[in-house]
Image: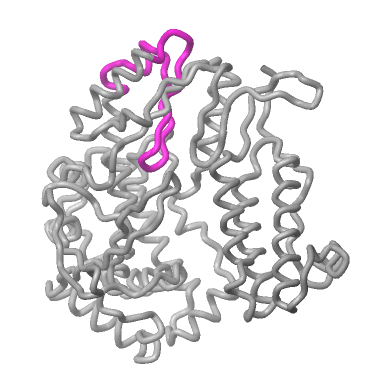
Amino acid sequence: MPEERRRPVSKRDEESNKSEGIDVSLPTLMSKVQTLQTSLQTKAKAEPAFRFYSLWDKVYRDDVLRVAYRRCRANRGAPGYDGISFKQIEDQGVDEWLERLQQELRVGGYQPQPLLRVWIPKAQGGQRPLGIPTIRDRVVQMAVLLVLGPIFEVDLLPRQYGFRPGLDAKMAIRAIHFGITQRGKREVVDGDLSDYFNTIPHGELMRCVSRRVSDGTVLSVIRKWLKVAVIERDERGERRTTEAKDKQRGTPQGGIISPLLSNLYFRRFLLAWQKFGFGQRLRAEVVNYADDLVILCPNGCGEKAMAAMRHLMSRLGLMVNEKKTRLVKLPDEHFDFLGYTLGQFYGKDGRPYWGTRPSKKAIKRLKQGIHNVTSSRWNASSVDSRIAELNLIIRGWTNYFNQGPVSKIYRNIRDYTERRLRIWLMRKHGKRGTGYRQYPDEYLYDILGLYRLPLARNDLLNAKA
């Protein structure tokens, strides 16, 4: 069942809805959209070979566009290349803006606008390009996703955990842990694809889409999104328009529709894995999240599974990153996946266990984030703003990294946060020293309201080795 049908409506949603000038209540809009999604998904389940031929009129329905706008607004993204922000749209009137967009979609006048390219740091170092659509294009992509998502959700496979309703990265981690502890998988292919999103072949991808969709307008618009031009600033700050080196490959990272499209294409690898019998013959299980994958194998099957993966990826027009792809043999080695390190660890009593813990890279990135928001550049800002920033970072991190024995790591993070905050407070008030006497724990937590990391958890992932 699509996540959209289970998303609770918060008080903040309702207040934001009023401030944007949308008269129809969000629960009413969601109810209508959910009814549509249920109908589409029911049809897709009942007829696995059915191709939906009339979808575009659903995309520009008033309720679908309004919900799409709300979803995009909640993401609080930056403006695209045209510089138009949500505030500008709301100052001019959301109703009028949506009516113009709806008319554009209805009469066939819609044309995607260029993406704004920005570069963001990669976790492993370096940068990767992100293509930011205009708000107008984001809303249309979200509307298409609201319509297509329930249809393709039926076809995606159980071990695909990325960008799907009801599934998340921690469930992928649990699936891997289960394979190691309960199924005895002791060899793991830690796979890495080179620039997956930018190498997906358009022709084959559109075949994946058209297997379920025959609506010509929907297919045409998706093709245009795949080929849209990109605007970026050169070294002098001047704008220039660029196009992909290979116009027949890639789905723009940053587009709302891109995660669904990437899942559809990765599904081909998983189907081929089943079709050619690798899963059964090698007793090898694939766990996939977006462009990340591991293959869990029993002893002696890892090399064959890795060779099979290389062969299938090549046939799909994708490239395996040989520098990062490796065969891990448990219990002698560990491997990282989605920010976690998995493998055999040792408890306080010296006994081994199979478990998970936040990776060293994840801890380093968190500490860097804490350092950044307590650096001297923020000396003029208010204490409340620093506490709010710290709490946001730490809560978000601990909400995700809560699988396995984490008490020792949490204590380390708590000590680091306290130390950084005390140093910042001393600098802000023109004092020297560590600040332990001036700002004891009680002051940081009870007076300032710093989030206190828990030092004990009940949802541990570990098993005897």
Residue 256 can be seen, yes or no: no
Q: Nearer the viewer, residue 248 or 379?
A: 379
> In the rendered image of this protein, does residue 377 appear above or below residue 453?
below
Q: Quadrant of residue 21?
A: bottom left
Q: Residue 282, position in %: x, y?
A: 38, 12
Q: Residue at x 50, y 43 (%)?
A: 169
- In this picture the colour scheme is one colour
**Residue 127 appears in the figure:** yes
Stretch of the chain drawn in magenta: 273-302
Quarter of the view holding residue 34? bottom left
Which residue is painted at 44% across and 67% down in the image? 75
Out of 268 and 322, give the one closest to the viewer.
322
Q: Residue furthest bottom?
A: 92
- Percent x, y of residue 105: 19, 73
Circle count: 0
Asked whether, in this view, residue 81 is left or right of residue 295, the answer is left
Q: Is residue 286 inside the magenta stretch? A: yes
